[in-house]
Image (spheres, grey):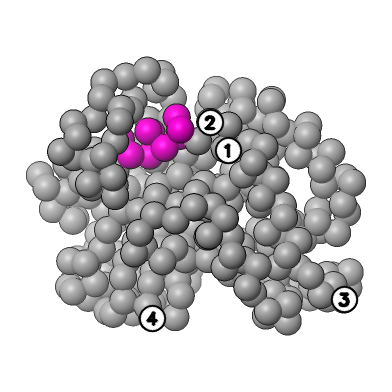
Amino acid sequence: MGWWQIGTDTLAGSSFVLSPLAEAVASLKTLHAGKAAHPGERAWLGRHLPAYRERLAAEPLDALLVRAAIGPTWNADFLTPTPLGDRERSFEEEVGAVRATEPADAVDQLAVALGGPVPEPLRSARDLPERLAGVLGWVWRETVLPEWARRRRILEADVVARTALLSRGGWAAALDELCPGKMRWLGDGRLQVNTRDYPPRSVDRGRLLFVPVTPATGWVSWEGTERYAIVYACAGVLADAAGPAVPEALGPCSGRPAPGCSYGSDPRCPPAS
């Protein structure tokens, strides 16, 4: 299993953050898989999968890049940059980290994601970061942005609910419920982040961020020793769009007041990588 050794200061300073880019990446992964985890996702795929496949058919190099970046067991790092976590940023701000990747570094990261050689067309391309940012931009504009307001309410509700669980049961309870069966607190500062056979990682400095997304997927990422992120599938995605308002006093838990949200009992999990 993959686990992290987490220092007490890191855990004490950890926080939940929303990331439009993470939501777009999770949506891209769902489109790439073409499989729905629940009826709501099935309806979403029905609306957007044909256009997504048409988009990639028109750009074969983009299609090859997406397959390589998602990889069989690991995401290429430049596909999943770790959020800064200092404030909520726009998609355009966040995707800048994808574009800023050096082309040579992108090829190296694709090799890790693939676990082997990178196909020649990708090795020869000098615009892989820009191409991947373009695909993510399409996914954001065409499939996420039109319903971002509703998704945001669901994400905010998830953060509020997990913050309440944290206040009742402490970090062990909150982390065990983040992804039942895959993530759990092992004791002695150890957090199991997935069930894969990866070497332990020391997370005794820097910030630890928990990032909810609405698609049924997730991953972990880190930026040196400065920031670590666990992206997880939030609860409540099957709930109706209308629902009770989140008390304004709880809004700061997610960075700003939540105008209203719906929350269901649909805890689904991710973290693999």
The numbered mark, 4 or 2, whose residue comes first in the sequence reads 2
The numbered mark, 2 or 3, whose residue comes first in the sequence reads 3
Please identify the dominant SS of the magenta region.
helix
**Which residue in the structure is indicated by mark 2?**
147
**Which residue in the structure is indicated by mark 4?**
225
Q: Which of marks 4 and 2 is in front?
A: 2
Residues under labels 4 and 3: Cα distance? Answer: 31 Å
Instruction: Determine contact: label 3, label 1, CB under 8 Å.
Output: no
Residues under labels 1 and 2: Cα distance? Answer: 6 Å
Q: How would you rate the neighbour count of disc 1 (Cα within 10 Å): few for under 14, some for 14-19, many for 20 or more?
A: many
- Residue at 23% from the left image edge and 47% from the top image edge: 253
**Which residue in the structure is indicated by mark 1?**
144
The numbered mark, 4 or 3, whose residue comes first in the sequence reads 3
Secondary structure under badge 3? helix
Q: Which of marks 1 and 4 is in front?
A: 1
Q: Which of marks 2 and 3 is in front?
A: 2
Secondary structure under badge 2? helix
Residues under labels 2 and 3: Cα distance? Answer: 37 Å
234 left or right, relative to 118:
left
**Front-most of 143 and 168?**
143
Q: How would you rate the neighbour count of disc 2 (Cα within 10 Å): few for under 14, some for 14-19, many for 20 or more?
A: few
Residues under labels 4 and 2: Cα distance? Answer: 35 Å
Decide whether residue 91 is among the magenta residues. no
Residue 124: which disc? 3
Q: Is residue 102 at least partly visible in the picture? A: yes
The amino acid type found where label 2 is placed reads: Glu
Residues under labels 3 and 1: Cα distance? Answer: 31 Å
